[in-house]
Amino acid sequence: MVTRNVFLPVVVAALGLLLAARPAPAACGETGVQLQILGSGGPGASSGRASAGYLVWVDGVSRILVDAGGGIKQRFHASGADLEDVGLLALSHFHPDHSAEVPALLWPGGGGLRVAGPSGSSAFPSLDDWLDGLFGPGGIFRVLAGRLDLDAVTVDVAAGAPAEVWRDGDVRVRGIGVPHADVPTVGYRVDVGDVSVGFSSDQNGSDAAFVELVRDVDVLVVHLGGAETSTGRSAELHARPSVWGALAADAGAGRVVASHVSTSSPQVLADSLAHLRAAYGGPVTVGEDLLCVPLP
Ligand SMILES: [Zn+2]
Ligand SMILES: [Zn+2]
């Protein structure tokens, strides 16, 4: 009896540790298709938000990761996602708030992965150059050179038409160049059966070809970044909120997710949302880290 009394708490504690070590269940549900926002922030201080990153869950499996800015590794693991389940990493562009956490996410390596991203310019590397500069034999993180099996697919941002970057069963992903000043940038559309989500990435909203790509999507993720009064370089980089609203209305998007929140000021955010909502009559979800948005 004495022995039992001594060891029972030890057994209970060990069981507790075992249970605590189990992976968390998929936070977005075991069936259906969901968009999960990993990071709802942008480059600036934005009240603890991670920078850009999104997951598409299909029947409880984390299939697609779009962008991986600062803070995404922590959010990725908090979401219950598994890198081995991810078939596609779709990178929009090589501003650090969209891509800087890729090495941390892929460390310590293992497994295969398709990576999609933009062609280059005189100021920005192509996807191939970027991957080689990080993970090639002479790359910064060459410690990963032999540990990764990356299958790179480049989207020619000057093509003016969408390119398919991944297809697996009824999952289809297409990308197209979008106008983000002089930064080669890709917007994506993910279709899973008859549901769909569009990812604008950072852009100024001036190219009708992107509107065509995301025509009638169930959910359109737009990136706030410019104020309604922005001019000059800022206006070349980022659509004004009213432009986002008009673009979403024009595309017939079923819901807008406003993300890439680049301010810590509730008032600045509220002003941006008011301008967006004035031009778009559908439902608007304000992005929050780890929020799940079901696709109908
Ligand atoms: Zn950005
Ligand atoms: Zn950017």
Image (spheres, grey):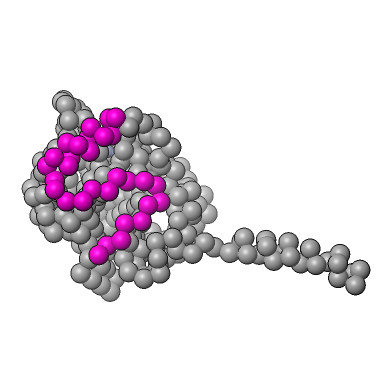
Where residue 187 appears, as percent x and y from the top left, is 21, 50
Residue 182 in view here: no
Whether 116 is drawn above or below 8: the answer is above
Q: Say which residue appears at 52% left-offset and 61% top-offset.
A: 24
The answer to which of 219 and 184 lies nearer the viewer is 219
Where residue 56 appears, as percent x and y from the top left, is 33, 60
Whether 200 is drawn above or below 167: the answer is above
Whether 47 is drawn above or below 91: the answer is above
Q: Say which residue appears at 43% left-offset and 37% top-offset.
A: 48
> Based on the displayed image, in which of its 4 quarters is residue 130 positioned?
top left
Q: Say which residue appears at 22% left-offset and 38% top-offset.
A: 273
Look at the image and give the residue range highlighted in magenta.
Answer: 267-296
Q: Decide whether residue 276 is among the magenta residues.
A: yes
Where residue 87 appears, as percent x and y from the top left, is 36, 64
Where residue 27 appears, as percent x and y from the top left, is 44, 60
User: How many dots with numbers?
Assistant: 0
Q: Decide whether residue 130 is among the magenta residues.
A: no
Q: Residue furthest right?
A: 2
Q: Say which residue appears at 17% left-offset and 45% top-offset.
A: 178
> Based on the displayed image, in which of its 4 quarters is residue 1 positioned?
bottom right
Residue 251 in view here: yes
- Quadrant of the snapshot with the C terminus: bottom left
The answer to which of 246 and 237 lies nearer the viewer is 246
The answer to which of 136 and 199 lies nearer the viewer is 199
